[in-house]
Image (cartoon, rainbow, N blue to C red):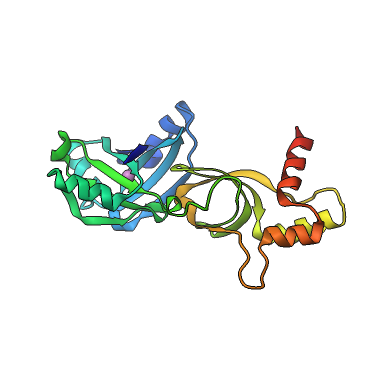
Amino acid sequence: MIRRIDHIGIAVRSIDERLPFWSQALGLQLAGLEKVAAEGVEVAMLPAGAARIELLEPLGEDSAVGRFLSRRGEGIHHLTFEVDDIEGTLAGLRERGVPVVGDGPRAGAGGSRVAFLHPRAAGGVLVELVEHPARQDADIAPGRAVLLYLREPQEKLWGVLRRMDGAGVVLEGIDLSSFDDWVAQIERGEESVVGPSVLFVPMMRLEKILLDRSSGHLPSLAERFQRRTGRSVQDVLDGSSSAGA
Ligand code: CO
């Protein structure tokens, strides 16, 4: 099942040269740059609502995007739909005789799995399908305490998940390395020096999301927080946001 348009891939000769139109003139925010060696491209991601624009600059002339540029010049390269179940979707398409590029899904950015349908299936439009990793665990939902593992640069964040979609994740939380300082500060009833903030993490920086849960005799971070401060995390976060309003 198709959920939505995930992104539109645009082939450019130079990200540096084309970025000002998208980021400055249109005001889209650059969420990140990533080299995807397997595809031979550097990718600039710019979220636009629930979808995003992907600028694709070839790392070499013999890459797919390099060949596209020499054949057709700059322009829209592919259109990507997010699906729930990429394998099931591909099987259904194959049954209908839709030509799929390659054998099956392969690894895409941010732990996703992607597949391409041959452009002859859609009158010259290259259609990509993507399944995002976070969809696979139904327990990971807004309101739950989670740990986020980020890459480039590597960071670990802890907090309460506020929103999650194909573009990324909104977390109200704190860098894991500051967690103890934050709790100690609340324990002592001090003015906040370190504290949680609401932040957006683009999907491409997300390595994994883990539920913050206890394992064996080790309490979850949310439980540790509650034991030490006598207050629930939700309570403290709601208190801090209403105090700031
Ligand atoms: Co793409």
Residue 185 position, x and y percent, is 82, 55
Residue 64 seen anywhere in this rendered image of the structure:
no
Residue 75, position in %: x, y? 27, 34
All told, the count of numbered labels is: 0
User: Residue at coordinates 17% horizontally, 44% vertically from top-left?
Assistant: 118
Vertical placement of residue 173 versus 79, above or below: below
Q: Residue at x 12, y 44 (%)?
A: 97
- Check the picture and name the quadrant holding the N terminus: top left
| In-image side of 199 versus 168 (left or right) | right
Query: Who's the residue at 73% across and 62% down the image?
Result: 224
The C terminus lies in quadrant? top right
Q: Is residue 111 above or below residue 22?
A: below
Expressed as whole percent of the image width and height from the top left, the position of residue 241 reads 73, 38
x then y, percent, for residue 136: 42, 54
Residue shown at 79% from the left, 37% from the top: 243
State the residue in front, 77 or 115: 115
Given the current orientation, which residue lies at the most extreme top position? Answer: 25
Up/down of 41 relative to 165, above or below: below
Q: Quadrant of ligand 1?
A: top left
Is residue 107 found left or right of 19 in the rendered image?
A: left
